[in-house]
Amino acid sequence: MSDSAGGRPRGLRGIVRTWGEVLVRPRRAFANGVTPGDQAPALTFAVAVAAAFTLGWIGSDPAAMPVVVPSSRLLSEAVVFLVVVALAAPVGLHLTAAVATVSVVLASVEFDGGLGLRDRGGVSETVQVVAYASSPMALGGPAIPELRVLCGAYAAVLLFVGFREIHGLGPVRTVAAALPPAALGYGVGYRVVAAARTLLGA
């Protein structure tokens, strides 16, 4: 990820390499791999993570999948997978990134002789951080609440690390910026909140 043209390597090998580097060396991955205006690989990455999550979920808990084609469970699962990859993942990424962008702007407000905004990264960098921070969720698909909560928690930590690295905000401001998109994208989108409620018996 760190020595590729345009910010990160492309293709399947690039996705796997980026995934591993974000999990193991997140600060380096965000610092060297996030570049202005380079959102396409991030979208591909987010779709790949969502695909892995969905396959894990289908494989471990097929009964939880909606029955789209009553005559064939396998076909129903295929339709669900395609909808996630083609529609839910891209829409979810951009919705979460929109919330993240607003959160970053609000967290950047300062009062220093007047109302102003601190210097920060751009919208495209925010989109990329949201996408790459979702890396742990590729492992969170199986219907194991403990695993899903752990993956969601680490994704939130990665989002904090990414925002801190890219936007240069202080710890408190970074937490304020990261919490809303983490809650929406990972908590709701990847059903981490539902898994936590299961663990708590709610």
Image (cartoon, rainbow, N blue to C red):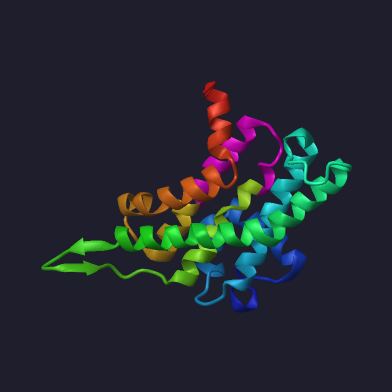
Say which of 71 and 134 sits in front: 71
In the picture, measured across the screen, residue 4 lies left or right of residue 155, that is: right
x 74%, y 40%: residue:
65
Q: Residue at x 77, y 35 (%)?
A: 60
Of 131 and 189, the residue lying toward us: 189
Q: Main secondary structure of the magenta part?
A: helix
State which quadrant residue 61 falls in: top right
Please tell me whether residue 178 belongs to the stretch shown in magenta: no
Q: Is residue 189 above or below residue 21?
A: above
Left or right: 167 as drawn, with respect to 115: right
Tell me where the magenta segment starts and ends, as one range.
138-158
**Quadrant in which residue 84 is drawn:** bottom right
Q: Quadrant of the N terminus?
A: bottom right
Query: What residue is at 72 percent from the left and 56 percent from the top?
Result: 83
Looking at the picture, how far across and down is residue 137, in whole percent?
Answer: 63, 47
In the rendered image, the vertical position of residue 9 relative to residue 194, given as above or below: below
- Is 35 left, or right, of 119 in this rendering? right
Q: Position of residue 36 (x, y in %)?
A: 50, 76
Is 128 on the left or on the right of 41, as rendered?
left
Observer-nearest of 107 and 172? 107
Residue lying furthest left in this view?
113
Q: Is residue 111 visible?
A: yes
Q: Which residue sits furthest top? A: 201
Q: Name the residue located 84 percent from the left edge and 41 percent from the top edge.
A: 70
Figure disc tally: 0
Image quadrant assignment for residue 115: bottom left
Give yes or no for residue 147 being in the magenta stretch: yes
Question: x%, y% of residue 198?
Answer: 58, 26
Q: In this orientation, does residue 18 appear?
A: no
**Residue 33 position in % (x across, y down):** 56, 68
